[in-house]
Amino acid sequence: MDYLVRGIGEKGKITVYVARTTELVEKARIIHNASPTAIAALGRALTLVAIMGKMLKGKETISLQILGNGPLGGIFVDSDAYGNVRGYVKRPYIDLPPTPEGKLDVSSAVGQKGIISIVRDLGLKEPYRGSTNLVSGSIAKDLAYYFSYSEQQPSVVAAGVYVDKSGKVSSAGGYIVQVLPDTSLDLIEKLENNISSMDPPSQLILKGISPEEIAEKILKNLDKKIFDSEKLNYSCRCSRVKAENVLLALGIKELRELINKQEITEVKCEFCGNKYKFTSKDLEELINLLKNKQ
C-alpha cells in the first residue's frame, strides 16, 4: 500500500514528509504506457505533489506543472488533501539512453531550461500561483529551488523511481524536509549529515525500508515524533459533466463544426484515459444551453 508519514523534530522546528508511491506510479505507467525515462520523470512529480497535497486542508487542491525544453514536452500533476493524486506527461513514449552512471536520464528528458509552476486552490476567490525557472530538470532539485526562492521556505527535496528490466516500477517514493527560519545552524548541520548518509529514496524503498524508518533516519539523534500513516492513491476526478464543460468552452461555432464533421465526438481525459462520447444530439443540447445563456 502506498502511504505517507509525517514527522516533526525538535518541537516543530523541523517537519518531515516521507511517501512510498510504488503502486500509484506503476498505475500511472500502465495508464499512459510510459517508457522507463518518462515514468521516472512523471513518478517523481507524482510523488512530490502527493506530499504537497498532504500539506493542504479540507477541499484544497494543488497542481504542479513542469514545462522544460527537453523532449518529454511537459509534466502535469495534481493532488488533494485526501491523498488522491493523478498526472500525465505530454510525450510518454520518449525514452533516452542511460547516463554514464547507468541511471535514467530524467534531467535531459525534462530539460534544464524552462518553468516549474505551482497552483494552490485554497478555496479563495483566486488560487495562489507561483513559479521559478528550472535549475536542473531533476524535478526534486527544481522543487527545492522553488520552495527557497518563491516561498522563502528552506527545504530538502528528494524523489526517485526504480524501473526494472521489464519496464515495471519496482519502487518509488520521496521526501520533503522543511525547517523554520530561526532553526540553528548546528541543528541544520545535524539534519544535513543525516540526509547525506542515506541512500536515494527509491533504493531505500526497494530494500523494504518503510517511510517510518526513513523518517527516523532523517531525524536520527534528534528529538522527534512520527505520526500515523495516511494513504495515497492514483485517482482521477474526471466525469462526464467535466467533459461537457470542456465542450461548452469551445463555443457554439466550434460545436456546430463538430456536428458537421462527425457523428460521435470523443473527449479523452489526459490523466486517466477515460473517454466520454457525445452524439450530435448531445452537442445540439449543449448549443441550446449556450444560446439560453446569451
Image (cartoon, grey):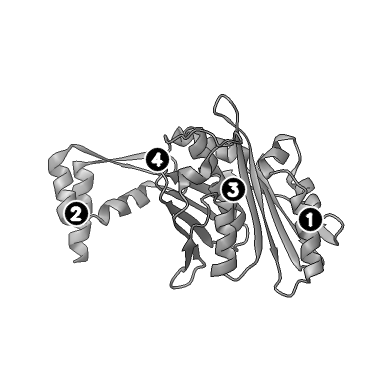
Which amino acid type is marked by label 4? Arg
Residue at 80% in and 50% down = 217
User: Does label 3 or label 2 sit earlier along the sequence?
Assistant: 3
Q: Nearer the viewer, mark 1 or mark 2?
A: 1
Looking at this view, name the residue that lies furthest to the front. 100
User: Does label 2 or label 4 sit earlier along the sequence?
Assistant: 4
Q: CA distance from mark 1 to mark 3?
A: 24 Å
Q: CA distance from mark 3 to mark 2?
A: 40 Å
User: Does label 1 or label 3 sit earlier along the sequence?
Assistant: 3
Q: CA distance from mark 1 to mark 2?
A: 63 Å
Residue at 75% in and 42% down = 210
Decide which of 221, 55 is in the foreground and name it: 221
Residue to which mark 1 is pinned: 193
Decide which of 126, 71 is in the foreground and name it: 71
Q: CA distance from mark 4 to mark 3?
A: 19 Å
Residue at disc 1, secondary structure:
helix
Q: Nearer the viewer, mark 4 or mark 3?
A: 4
Q: Nearer the viewer, mark 1 or mark 4?
A: 1
Residue 28 visible: no
Residue at disc 2, secondary structure:
helix
Which amino acid type is marked by label 1? Asn
Which amino acid type is marked by label 3? Thr
- Find out whether the residues at labels 3 and 2 contact each other: C-beta distance under 8 Å: no
Residue to which mark 3 is pinned: 47
Residue at 51% in and 46% down = 107
Image vertical order of residue 145 relative to residue 268, above or below = below
Q: Position of residue 199 (x, y in %)?
A: 73, 43
Residue to which mark 4 is pinned: 91
Q: Nearer the viewer, mark 2 or mark 4?
A: 4
